[in-house]
Amino acid sequence: MRRGAALLLSGAIGMTGCAQSAGWSEDAVRGEALVQDLGCLACHGPEHGLGPTWSGAWGMPRRLADGSTVVFDAAYVRTSVLEPGAQVVTGFDPVMPSFSLTEDDLAAIVAYLQESG
Ligand code: HEC
């Protein structure tokens, strides 16, 4: 009886450890693969600098070339990907190509940007 309870308990602890190892939703994990496959990191990766870094960007205000300010959120990310010229970040050239992605892929990229940064 006692031994059984101890085994159950260690099983539960093991499972908790497992769930914590990633901490990201499935969408975010897929989004990370997408930004690698689509070549986003060629410009947005930490070592390049053609585009703004995403590190610490989520939820922060972004200053645009037209003098306005937007918050880095889901709507902003969608516009930036589908229509990069619509909201250009100040200090950067408008060199980002537009990407036509499915709703699913867009949602995955948004989840990745939100959960990673
Ligand atoms: C050729 C380089 C290049 C590639 C490839 C590229 N971007 Fe960009 N991106 C930029 C530049 C430059 C800006 C800043 C100017 C602007 O806002 O359009 C930008 C802006 C952005 C912004 C908003 C600006 C901000 O505040 O960070 C997001 C979000 C973004 N890109 C996402 C993506 C995603 C997702 C991909 C891949 C599907 C991608 N970019 C591919 C160059 C690139």
Image (cartoon, grey):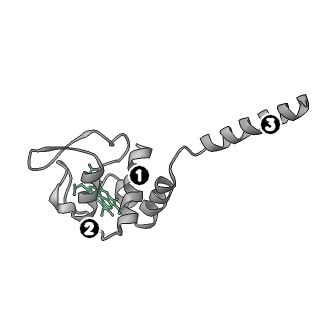
Earlier in the chain: of badge 3 and badge 2, it is 3
Residue at 77 percent of width and 39 percent of height: 11
- Density class for disc 1 (Cα within 10 Å; few <14, some 14-19, many ≥20) is many
- Density class for disc 3 (Cα within 10 Å; few <14, some 14-19, many ≥20) is few
Q: Is mark 1 on a helix, strand or loop?
A: helix
Identify the image quadrant of the C terminus. top left
Q: Look at the image and tell me whether residue 47 can be seen.
A: no
Dot in front, 3 or 2: 3
Where residue 2 sits: x, y (%)? 89, 28
The amino acid type of the residue labelled 1 equals: Ala
Identify the image quadrant of the N terminus. top right
Image-quadrant location for residue 110: bottom left
How far is the residue under mark 3 from the one under mark 2?
54 Å
Q: Look at the image and tell me whether residue 69 can be seen.
A: yes
Residue under label 1, please give it: 111
Residue under label 3, please give it: 8
Residue under label 2, please give it: 97
In the displayed structure image, the side of residue 54 where residue 82 appears, left or right:
left
The amino acid type of the residue labelled 3 equals: Leu
Dot in front, 3 or 1: 3
* Dot 2 and dot 1 residues touching (CB under 8 Å): no
- Dot label at residue 90: none
The answer to whether mark 2 is within 8 Å of ligand 1 is yes
Where residue 40 sits: x, y (%)? 37, 61
